[in-house]
Image (tube, grey):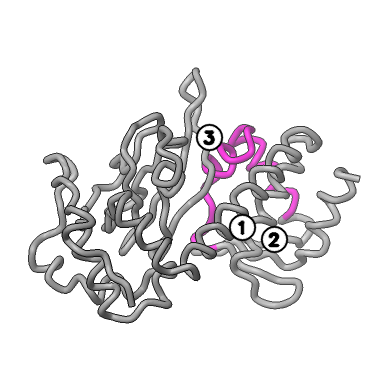
């Protein structure tokens, strides 16, 4: 199986002091760290080891910026441990959350593909360990492994579809319905049956508000209303959706 060689790619530069690289002890166990990455699951241990030699592990503190919007870096990042958020900011400083990323996810491929500036900020939500792959190694991997290239294209298609849906929501739905639509998007990732699901950890009001361009007070009112109707239930650790069909109806009746 083709591998990236040292003549093809060079290790990326060490991170700045405030974004310290992972300790040598952890990095030594690197091959096993890449095994949990969804994008690389089709590769054998030898191929993953070659990819690992092309990049570097970095650890970011909570709220540390991994990527800055309009930056000219081109590395692709894979989350080994932790969580991160893709976010932009309005001219007034209001946060606009685009997506949350978990261990096993990757991000940063747009700039690696088209050499353009970064399209959004990516911020660590908790202490987060990532593997940074240089652009040249990423492109070589896509050429050598068409199945991985297809998965990257499929993910990008999903991003376009999600963006289209959000634009339609902002254009056609009132704030309360946008909150309901956001709950639907989140619960579909954690279905617990045909008509039930769980959002865990329990979403923070300000996070939902930033995703759908409304206020925390509006989010609180919508959640309270849904709870009174028996559609949702708050627990200590999660938000239970008891009737996804009714929630869908509330949104679709407005969309028409």
Give percent across and percent down for residue 254: 87, 43
Q: Quadrant of the N terminus?
A: bottom left
Q: Which residue is mark 1?
A: 186
Q: Is residue 250 above or below residue 148?
A: above
Helix, strand or loop under label 1: helix
Q: Which residue is mark 3?
A: 96
Q: Earlier in the sequence, mark 1 or mark 2?
A: 1
87 sits to left or right of 234: left
Q: Is residue 172 above or below residue 252?
A: above
Instruction: Decide which of 132, 211 is in the foreground and name it.
Output: 132
Q: Which residue is mark 2?
A: 232
Which quadrant of the figure has residue 228?
bottom right
Label 1 vs label 2, nearer the camera: 1
The residue carrying pointer 3 sits among few (fewer than 14), some (14 to 19) or many (20 or more) residues within 10 Å by Cα, namely some
Residues at discs 3 and 1 in contact (Cβ within 8 Å): no
The residue carrying pointer 1 sits among few (fewer than 14), some (14 to 19) or many (20 or more) residues within 10 Å by Cα, namely some
Question: What's the residue at 32%, 72% (across, down)?
Answer: 2
135 sits to left or right of 213: left
Q: Earlier in the sequence, mark 3 or mark 1?
A: 3
Give percent across and percent down for residue 222: 71, 45
Question: What's the residue at 75%, 39% (across, down)?
Answer: 168
Stretch of the chain drawn in magenta:
200-226
Q: Taking the image as drawn, is residue 236 in sight?
A: no
């Amino acid at each position: 199986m083709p591998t990236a060689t040292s003549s093809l790619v060079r290790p990326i530069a060490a991170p700045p002091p405030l974004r310290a690289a992972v300790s040598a002890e952890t990095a030594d166990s690197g091959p096993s760290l890449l095994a949990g990455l969804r994008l690389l699951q089709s590769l054998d241990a030898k191929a993953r080891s070659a990819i690992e030699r092309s990049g570097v592990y970095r650890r970011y503190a909570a709220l540390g910026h991994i990527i800055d919007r309009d930056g000219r870096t081109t590395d692709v990042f894979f989350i080994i441990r932790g969580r991160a958020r893709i976010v932009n900011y309005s001219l007034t400083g209001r946060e606009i959350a685009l997506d949350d990323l978990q261990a096993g996810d990757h991000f940063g491929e747009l700039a690696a593909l088209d050499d353009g500036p970064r399209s959004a900020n990516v911020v660590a939500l908790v202490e987060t360990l990532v593997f940074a792959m240089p652009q040249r190694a990423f492109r070589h991997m896509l050429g050598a492994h068409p199945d991985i290239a297809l998965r990257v294209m499929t993910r990008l298609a999903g991003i376009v579809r999600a963006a289209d849906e959000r634009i339609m929501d902002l254009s056609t739905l009132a704030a309360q319905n946008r909150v309901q639509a956001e709950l639907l998007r989140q619960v579909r990732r954690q279905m617990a049956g045909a008509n039930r699901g769980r959002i865990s950890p329990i979403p923070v009001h300000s996070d939902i508000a930033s995703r759908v361009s409304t206020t925390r007070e509006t989010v609180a009112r919508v959640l309270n209303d849904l709870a009174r109707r028996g559609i949702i239930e708050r627990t200590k650790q999660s938000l239970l959706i008891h009737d996804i069909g009714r929630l869908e109806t509330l949104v679709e009746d407005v969309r028409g």
